[in-house]
Amino acid sequence: MNLMKKILTAAVASAMIAGTAQAAISNNEVRIGYLADMSGTYRDLAGPNGLTALQMAIEDFGGQVHGAPIRVLSADDRNSADVASSTVRQWVERDNVDMVAGMVASSVTLAAVRILEQNDKLGIVSGSAASSITNEHCSPNHIHYVYDTYPLAHGTAQAVVQEGGDSWFILTADYAFGHALEADVEKVVLENGGRVIQKVRHPFPTSDFSSFILQAQSSGASVVALANAGSDTTNAITTAGEFGLTQSGQTLAALLLFLTDVHALGVEAAQGIQLTTGWYWDMNDETRAWSDRFMEKTGVRPTMVHAGIYSSTLHYLSAIEATGTDDTQTVRRHMMDTPINDMFAQNGIIREDGRMIHDMYLAQVKTPAESQNEWDLYNIVRTIPAEEAYRPLSESQCRLVNN
Amino acid sequence: MSMIFGVPVAVLSGQLLLGLINGAFYALLSLGLAVIFGLLKIINFSHGAFYMLGALLTVVLFNTLGVNYWMALFLAPLIVGIVGVLVEYFLLRKIANEDHIYSLLLTFGLALVIQGVLTNIYGVSGMRYAIPEVFRGGVNLGFMFLPYYRAWVIVAALVVCFGTWFMIEKTKLGSYLRAGTENSKLMQAFGINVPLLVSLTYGFGVMLAAFAGVLAAPIYSVTPVMGANILIIVFAVVVIGGMGSIIGAIVTGLAMGVIEGLTKVFYPEAASTVIFLVMVLVLLVKPAGLFGKEA
Amino acid sequence: MMTPISENTATKRYVENALRSERRHFKIYAVLLLLALVAPFVVYPVFLMKILCFALFAVAFNLLLGYVGLLSFGHAAFLATGGYTTGYLLSTYSGFSTELAILLATAASTLLGLLFGVLAIRRQGIYFAMITLALAQLVFFFYLQSPFTGGEDGMHGIPRGALLGFIDLQNNLMMYYFVLAVFVFGFGLVRRIVHSPYGQILKAIKENEPRATSLGYNVDQYKLVAFVVSAGLAGLAGSVKTIVFQLASLNDAHWHMSGEVVLMTLLGGVGTLLGPVIGAAFVVSLEHQLAQSALGNWVNVILGIIFIVCVLTFRAGIVGEFQKFFKKNFR
């Protein structure tokens, strides 16, 4: 069955190459748009350094694909759906951009992929967390590459419950992403025999978390979970440390934490926190080698988003090279049929809903004694296999999946 | 355990105390704004940026020169104060006779520049600053665990607030200041250097913001954008208190901290909105704010 | 004036002057309209539509700030109400008529404007600004919490529909001319108001409110009407903007948006009819160009510098300074 499928695809692909040998690449140039928050809250996890990662991928690919030069456009989305929408519209309608990469805030991503679908161009989402992007909002025109809220909730919550943390206090950022994360966590906790004592939703953004930490302390829950992101999470962790939350026997679980966040917190404040990540720079020789090159250019270690941008761009370019065209559906088909094996993922597969599934990792922040240098931050505790990590297709609400 | 609206009294008293501590921050910040508006009629939209600058300087001075917390407590506000004096001298002075709205626009632009430049240098992930050694740990009050540092924050903030109030309302320097800004020609004739007084007042106002920033550095993530969101809340506090009223800013700051703290228990989603509700209600009943004089 | 002139001559001269400036203005408008008609063949139409929507928003805002002297810091609420109402109607009821959605959205923000106005209109200066800000924050909270808006994610994929049932707005060019028509209507309305006797009273109130009161005018009522019209037009701008971009998001309701419209108006020239239009075009193009340039992460810094320079050197705004220059040298 599988073999049949492969042979068929190969045949189709070669037929396509034969049929469209000339002028297969529109405008004789492959144009990639990089859209991300360059100046606001989400700047550090993707931002300007994400553009560097993208350019590294193009360099490593040789600067051209199938004989055509590769051009990169970039824009600051200012975390605004408006800006995202008008930028992407202009890119695809006027500048003939073939693929849009980056995309962090979910409002930005949702706005961008709508337009990509209308114009049949490709989007590779690396920064966003919302699992809805390949669930109810899935489209044949985008791929969600690095991570989403489903594995974040499952990886961390499951591990914590299994270690005996059975009563939960969930502190949620009061917007769509937080709600999604909260719902996912609650489900996992209940499935694993735990219970949720209290859920509190805080305004986004919040700078003072003392009141919420106090509520968490007096709730008597054994686990305090943070379903928020960015400076909200780091502020909450700092305050939890100040109020001695963990000393009094409660466990702190941060559901979304980027390397840059942990770096900002420092191991002193963040030690022992468990988190789920899609990638870590210090996993093996390959990841270290790439991270060294990245650090040479940017001065910082890459987050999983940076690595994902690099990997997905290479995968995209390889698909164009192999099929000889930048036609969106042909390229996407080829990307789906080719497993991803590089420094970012082993045997990563892009499913029909656009979700790239790959192994995720449960990590724990090192103690000051263990940490050798400022970027030596995680111990990888467990590898969560791809099939287990992501929402199974059988539960999918995506219209591209036959359920 | 006794309960109020389904919340244990112990929890409630903890929240009240925390609200008061947050209120102390609001009081410090709105005090600076009130001084600047009350005496100079400048709508200082870069107040949040100066607050951030105080916190950022604390971290950067420590990381680069090893300046400790106590020195930073004086040094950071001093540096920010000097920056403030320069801003007044080179920028705000040029539009002193124009409509207030131009000072708003100018300081807003300035805030964008300061925040933008620092974002490009330091990123937005936030920097950590350790709580000074003497304030590590805390005390169990029975109803809550109170970190020593928070206790210090409220003491330091209140001392500075009431010191400022005393200086402006009760001392000779304060009376010069009030007179100088109300009738500068007359005071000039008396031999008082009014332009200098104006520069120093602005410098002093932003120093208060920077002082709040230093106090905030060990407990909040220090990022170049940390002052952007607090700005309009602090503005609301000043308006509720009555624009320009020193005591109004202090009292309202504390009160808003408490109200916000209680909202965080009963309707947490609305915690950052409740102040605006209070503001609408207050302005409907008392058009010039709680402590303001009707024009 | 030293030489005595009879009243008759004075009136005549006044009328002549008015007519001449009217004619000159007419020429300017004609040229601008012509430019606007051919622009989509040169410039990317969606970008032009964005400018037009914000220009209408700024024109509406300027009716208050420039001609009544009221600084509203809550106009984002009206923009967002226009946008969300349109979005809700068009995406919930499939096949809902686009023009009806726009009308209802404008009505909704007009009503909201009436509510704001009744509560705020008696306040002066900074208090007026702050109470409108506070009310707008409450509206923001409402949109943040209401499930129908999609919260932080916003409303996406709102259908553009067809105008009067047969003009397909999915076509960018058609859409553009429709937006242009709406803009011309809004601009024309404000111009009509400003030049009407009612507009003269507004100006009198701006110049000296106690005098207007003592002349027997019900000042609050005049201000209220201006506020409501301004809110309605801002809602119209938000409604059209939602149709153009097919999305409505919280950005429109955020206080930054209220700030942005102040900046556009001041930069272009407060109290001039064309000022807000130029200001909106300038700010939108600048943000657009910078965001996509290598200076992407310096957008805020550059905007900040421009505002500082604007306040220090050309406070009357682009159009205002131009008029001053023109008056000084050519009259």
Image (spheres, rainbow, N blue to C red):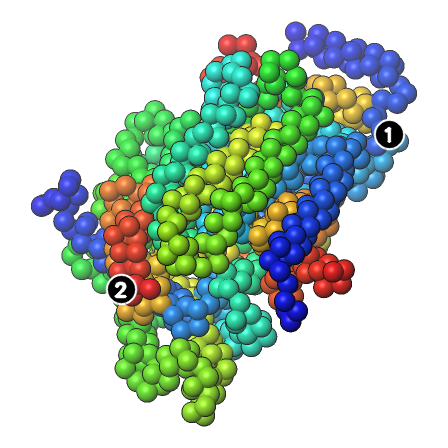
Residue A149 appears left or right of B35 = right
Residue flagged by tag 2: what amino acid is it?
Phe
Q: Nearer the viewer, residue B283 or C255?
A: B283
- Is residue B92 placed above or below A96 in the rendered structure? below
Q: Nearer the viewer, residue C307 or B64?
A: C307
- Identity of the residue drawn at 32% across and 87% down: B172
Any part of residue C296 in sight: no
In the rendered structure, the residue with mark 1 lies on which chain?
Answer: A
Q: Nearer the viewer, mark 1 or mark 2?
A: 2
- Identity of the residue drawn at 68% across and 28% down: C177
Residue flagged by tag 1: what amino acid is it?
Asn
Q: Which residue is mark 2?
A: B291
Dot 2 lies on which element? loop
Q: Nearer the viewer, residue A401 or B193?
A: B193
All told, the count of numbered labels is: 2
Q: Which residue is mark 1?
A: A28
Q: Are marks 1 and 2 on the same chain?
A: no
- Identity of the residue drawn at 49% across and 78% down: B199
CA gap between label 1 and label 2 equals: 70 Å
- Is residue A307 placed above or below C84 in the rendered structure? below
- Identity of the residue drawn at 30% across and 56% down: B287
- Is residue C113 placed above or below B220 in the rendered structure? above
